[in-house]
Amino acid sequence: MPGEMFPSLYPHLFQKVIWPWGPTQAQFVLLEDAPPQKVIANVNIVATIAGGWVVLQLANGTWDIPGGTLEPGESYL
């Protein structure tokens, strides 16, 4: 599977976490295919260009990656 080396390169990304506002247990995983569209609620994009990463600086000065919540009837594609 392409990306098998990612967990060893980015261990913090792949470790299990508990989000206290749920509490919700979460873990990042790589999939061969996209999951069913009905279970996709948010999409974030990690885009690159010319060897760099595309990030946004918000009005309050914090940094974020492009993405957001899907609207009813909107496709993640």
Image (tube, rainbow, N blue to C red):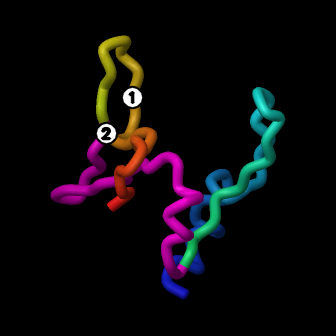
Q: Kindly state the secondary structure of the residue where label 1 is placed.
A: strand
Mark 1 — residue?
A: 63
Write down the region rendered in magenta.
Answer: 32-55
Q: Is residue 65 above or below residue 8?
A: above
Q: Is residue 5 above or below residue 15?
A: below
In the image as oriented, which residue stretches furthest toward the top?
A: 60
Quadrant showing the C terminus: bottom left
Q: Is residue 26 above or below residue 24?
A: below
> What amino acid is labelled 1 in the image?
Trp
In the image as oriented, which residue stretches furthest toward the left?
A: 50
Q: Are marks 1 and 2 in contact (CB under 8 Å)?
A: yes
Mark 2 — residue?
A: 55
Left or right placement of residue 33 versus residue 18 in this view: left
In the image as oriented, which residue stretches furthest toward the bottom?
A: 1
Quadrant showing the N terminus: bottom right
Q: Is residue 45 above or below residue 77?
A: above
Give the mark nearest the N terminus, 1 or 2.
2
Q: Residues within 10 Å of mark 1 (few under 14, many from 20)?
A: few
Where residue 69 sits in the image (x, y, percent)?
45, 40
Q: Which mark is residue 45?
A: none
> Which quadrant holds residue 38?
bottom right
Please tell me which residue lies in front, 69 or 14: 69
Residue at image location 42% in from the left, 48% down from the top: 44
Residue at image location 77% in from the left, 45% down from the top: 17
> Which quadrant holds residue 9?
bottom right
Where residue 24 sits in the image (x, y, percent)?
79, 41
Where residue 20 sits in the image (x, y, percent)?
80, 30
Q: Kindly state the secondary structure of the residue where label 2 is placed.
A: loop
> What amino acid is labelled 2 in the image?
Val
Mark 1–mark 2 Cα distance, whole angstroms, equals: 7 Å
In the image as oriented, which residue stretches furthest toward the front?
A: 73
